[in-house]
Amino acid sequence: MTTNFEELLEAFRAFLQFQGTSMARDTAASIDWAMPVRPLEPKTAPCIRHLDRIGDIVPESAQPLVRSLAGNREALCWGQTYTKEDFGLDFLDNYGWVEVFGTRGHFANDEVAGGFLILGPETVYPDHHHEAEEIYIPLTDGTGWRKGEGAFQVRRATELIHHPSNINHAMKTGVEPLLALYLWRGGPLAAKSTITGGMA
């Protein structure tokens, strides 16, 4: 199995540096990108099947990053925070994440975590919260995002979404899958989110 995790890390950094929001650029500038490699055993998840469709619909600016992710999909250690008792088997079949760097990622970093979230089409990620501050940059269009007590708002690809510490948030995909880049900082980087909402 051929892997190029260093290329993936560089594509991640480059994508952040060229985003239109100062928060994305400032975050990229604050990260020490000279991270030691952490050997991890590959672990797959059903959601990676959506990467082929995702590659067809991401904007041109995200193509190098998504190509690198898709090219390494079988070698990466994908995770699922929840179980079928939390949200059911259909959710697990369409949900997964991979941490590129962080306390459990392919590159070791104790200060900030960064990776990707996949949600399949017609999937609800119910309200949840966590201590760490979170930045999301969706790489696909058409997903509804909710924060606090607000309604779902459909966000466009590359639009930065900021979740301060412990604020409830949820996502709901439409006919297309979601791929989103995420960053966690300022809290436990491996903590399980607290569920605060059901599947409706």
Image (tube, rainbow, N blue to C red):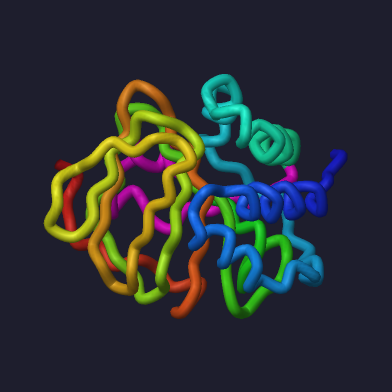
Q: Where is residue 42 shown, x and y percent of the image?
A: 71, 50
Out of 151 and 45, give the one closest to the viewer: 151
Residue 24 image offset from top left, x and y in percent:
53, 58
The location of residue 106, given as percent across then percent down, is 71, 61
Name the residue located 34 percent from the left edge and 48 percent from the top edge.
Answer: 84
Q: Quadrant of residue 172?
A: top left
- Residue 96 visible here: no
Q: Residue at x 44, y 79 (%)?
A: 187
**Is residue 75 shown above or below 188?**
above
Quadrant location of the N terminus in the rendered image? top right
The residue stretch that appears in magenta: 75-95
* Residue 27 part of the magenta-drawn span: no
Relative placement, left or right, of 99 versus 132 is right
Can you name the residue that lies furthest to the right here? 2
Pick the residue in front: 174 or 95.
174
Q: Is residue 139 visible in this depiction of the protein?
A: yes
Residue 13 image-quadrant placement: bottom right
Q: How many labels does the image show?
A: 0
Q: Quadrant location of the C terminus?
A: top left
Q: Which residue is drawn at 58% across and 30% down?
A: 51
Residue 92: within the magenta? Answer: yes
Residue located 25% across and 67% down the image:
167
- On the picture, is 29 further left or further right than 140? right
